[in-house]
Image (cartoon, rainbow, N blue to C red):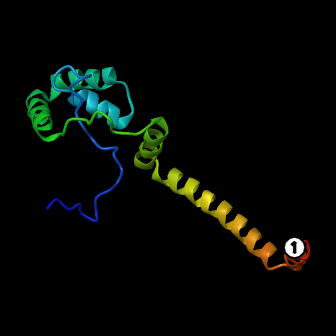
Amino acid sequence: MDRASPYDSPNPHRLYRDPQRGVLGGVCTGVADYFGVQPAVVRLAMLFALFFFSVPLVIAYVIALMVLPVRPAQLYRDAEEEAFWRTVSTKPDRTLAGLTQRFRDMEKRIVGMEAYVASKEFELNRAIRDLDR
């Protein structure tokens, strides 16, 4: 039986390799997608690092090629969901502040509704409505 761990995150923004858009297995494209940069930038950095760290870099690339899962075709439902999960991963404090503000706004509306329902005006409006019946 395949049970998900309670510690698994619903966040689909993970490090994948993307062989469809990649040159050699899609590792650089996957890293670029994860960090939100152009794949050419990561490829240039890899090429530059190849001059100084050739053996460790090749070993790390081969390990990443074997270990990283292939990016699923439909990772996000739409662009809005992708933007949300990227923000959660890269700027969690900004996402938390946005959610906090939304909850404060909802709380203000609920407090306003509770105040209206508990007011004499609500009782009067209900009594007038009941007279029409």
Report which quarter residue 115 is drawn in: bottom right
Residue under label 1:
133
Above or below for 5 versus 34: below
| Image quadrant assignment for residue 19 | top left
Residue 53 point in image, percent of width and height: 14, 30
Image point (58%, 60%), residue name: 100
Please name whichever residue, 82 or 110, is drawn nearer the observer in this view of the structure: 110
Percent x, y for residue 27? 21, 30
Q: Which is more toward the observer, 26 or 90?
A: 26
Which quadrant holds the N terminus?
bottom left
Q: Which residue is drawn at 35% across and 53% down?
A: 10
Q: Is residue 123 left or right of residue 86?
A: right
Q: Position of residue 16 (x, y in %)?
A: 24, 38
Residue at the location (10% across, 37% down)?
66
Question: Residue 59 or 21: which is nearer the viewer?
Answer: 21
Image height check: is 72 above or below 124? above
Identify the image quadrant of residue 75.
top left
* Rendered position, 97 above or below 52: below
Q: Where is residue 37 in the image (x, y as percent from the top left)?
A: 38, 29
Quadrant including the C terminus: bottom right
Q: Establish if 21 lies above or below 59.
A: above
Extreme residue toward the front, this view? 133
Using the image as rendered, state which of residue 102 and residue 129 is in the foreground. 129
Tell me the residue at 23%/23% (across/down): 20
